[in-house]
Image: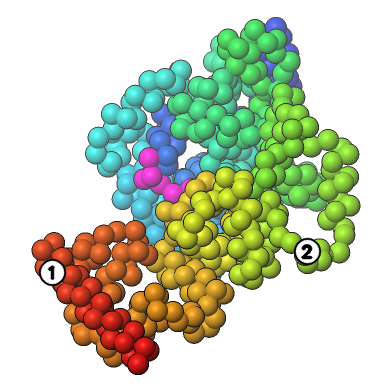
Amino acid sequence: MAINQRATSPPQTHNTRHGAWEEGIEGSFRPISTHQLFVAWWLHIEGHLTRKQLRVYFASHEMAERRRVAGQISKTQRFRPHYTVEEVAELVGSRRTASAMAELRSDIKHLKTLGLMAIEPHEIVFARSIDQITVGDASAFWEMFDRVPNGRRTVPVPRRTLRALAAGFSRAVTGVMLATLIRSLFWHKSTGTYRVDGRTKGSWVAEVFGISRRAVTDARATLIELGWLEPCDTPQWALNRWGAHARVNTKWCHREVVETKTSSNDNQHAGKSASPGSEFSGGSAKPDQTDSLPPRGNQNTRRLRHARNRSGIEDDPNRVGGSVPAARCEQHRRRSARPARRSRTKPSIHDVRPADLARMDRVLDLHHQAVECGLAVAGEGGRLDFVALAERARSRGKDPGAYFYWLLRERKTGFITQHEEDLASKRIKDHLYGAEHERPKHHDDGPPSLVRGGRSEGLTAEEWFVVTCVRIGKQHRVEPAAVAKRAKGWSQEAWDDAFDAFQRAQFERQSAAVMDVEL
C-alpha cells in the first residue's frame, strides 16, 4: 500500500496558506483506520474496555509494527515474528510481579473474548469493523461514528505517539489525541506528503468522544504544554466557526528516547524506520512530565483555576475571574507561616475548630450564634439536630470545622444517623443534668420512672412499654401510637386504653405520695 511508505530523510515542513505539509513522519508511523481507532475508543467509553486494556490495544499495534519493520529489514533471511506478554508489559509500564503479569494476561484474554484483538505466539489479529465485536447492539456506535468525517480513511499514527498512548494518559488526553489525529493528520497520495494541521472544535470532541467540555479544554492545554500539539494563530471568527487550528508535532519525542538515540551513535535504522533496537529497549514512549506540570486551563483564554474553598465561607468579593490578588496571596503565605492558633475565649460559627466541637458548652454557644444567623433552628429539636451534626463532623470529616459548617449551610439534617442522634442526646443530658442524667425531683415533675433513664419498680410491664413509646415518639417526632403499632402491633384503640390506664395509675401514685408527705 502506498500509505506504508517511509521517509528516508528528516522530514521537511512546507507551510502554505492551505496548511502545514511534511514529506515524512519522523520515527515512522503505523497505519490504522479511523474505524478501528473509534471502535476501540467507543468500547472504552461504553465500559467494555478499561483504560489499561485500551493501552494494551495500542501496545499491540506497536508490537505488530515492530515485526513488520524487522521483516522488511531481514528480507534475505527467514523471519518469523514472536510475541510475548513481557513485551506488552514493557510498553504499558506494568510491573513484573506474578500478580501483575496474571492481571495483564487476563486483560489480553478479555480483548480476545471481545473480538477486538488477539495476540497469538506468532501473530496479532485486529478487528477491522464493529461487526466483528461481540457487544450486541451497536446502534449507539453508528450514531456517534456518523459524526466522524472521513470515516473510511486510514490515519498515519506516529509510532512515538502510539507508544505514548500505550504508556498511559488520562482519559480526556487520550480522547483529544485520537480526535486530533483523525482531524489533523492526513497522507495525500498525489503528492506523497503528509498534512499535519487541522481544525477541531471542542464541542465536537466533547459530544462525539463523550468527554466534558472542560476536560477537553484542559486536555488540549496539557498537550500544548507537552509539545505534542502546536497551536496556530486563528482569528476569532474562524475559531467560532471551525474550531481551534493546531498542528501535530510529528517530531515530538520524550527525553528518554532522545538521550538513548544520542548514546546509540546514530543507529543505522533510527532515522529511517525506527526498527526495534537498543533505543526501544524500554518500549514505552511516555512523555516526560517532570520539568513542569501541565496547566489546569488554557493559558491564552482564561486564568488558572484556584483551589476549591473548603472553609465553608464564601469567596472574597475582591476576586476577579477566580484568581487571587497578589496582596492576598502574600497575606495567605504569611498566615501559613504563623505558629498554631491559640485557643479562643469564645467560639465563632464562621470559624469552627475541632476544639469547639469537643466541648459541649462551646457547641451550645455555637448553636446560639447559628440561630441568630439563620443556620439552625431554635428549641430542643433544633439543638438536638445541631449537636448531632457536630457529632457527625467529628467522626467523619477530615476538616471537622469546615465539614460542620457545610452541613449547617446545606441543611443536611437528613444525614443524621440514629447513633449520632443518641450520642447527641447523651451529650446534652450529661451537660445539663450531670453524668447520671438526674434532675431535681419536684412533685410536678412526674414519677421517678419518667425522669430517670432506668426502669422504675412501681411500673408494670405494660406501663413501662407506654412510657418507652412516649419517649421514642418525642425523640423521632412521631405519634407514640405508631411506635406501639410497629413494636407490638397495637391498634389505636388498644393504645388509647393502655395510655388512659397509665394516666389513672400515675394519678393514684401521685395522690398517695402527697398524702404521705402531709402525714
202 to the left or right of 258: left
Q: Please provide percent x and percent y for residue 429.
A: 50, 74
Q: Which residues are magenta?
A: 46-52
Residue 1, visible in the rendered structure:
no
- Dot placed on the residue nearer the N-terminal end, 1 or 2: 2
Q: What's the mark number on residue 506?
A: none
Could you tell me which secondary element the residue under label 1 belongs to?
helix
Return the residue at label 1.
497
Q: Is residue 234 magenta?
A: no
Q: Amino acid at mark 1?
A: Asp
Going by the numbered disc 2, the residue's amino acid type is Arg
User: Is the residue 167 above or below the residue 467 in the image?
Assistant: above
With respect to residue 352, does 409 lie above or below?
Answer: above
Quadrant housing residue 69: top right
Tell me: 507 left or right of 40: left
Query: Where is residue 333 drawn, in percent x and y?
Result: 86, 50
Looking at this view, is 202 or 14 the one in front?
202
Given residues 162 and 511, the one toward you in this image is 511
Q: Is residue 379 above or below residue 445?
A: above
Quadrant containing the C terminus is bottom left
Q: Secondary structure at mark 2?
A: loop
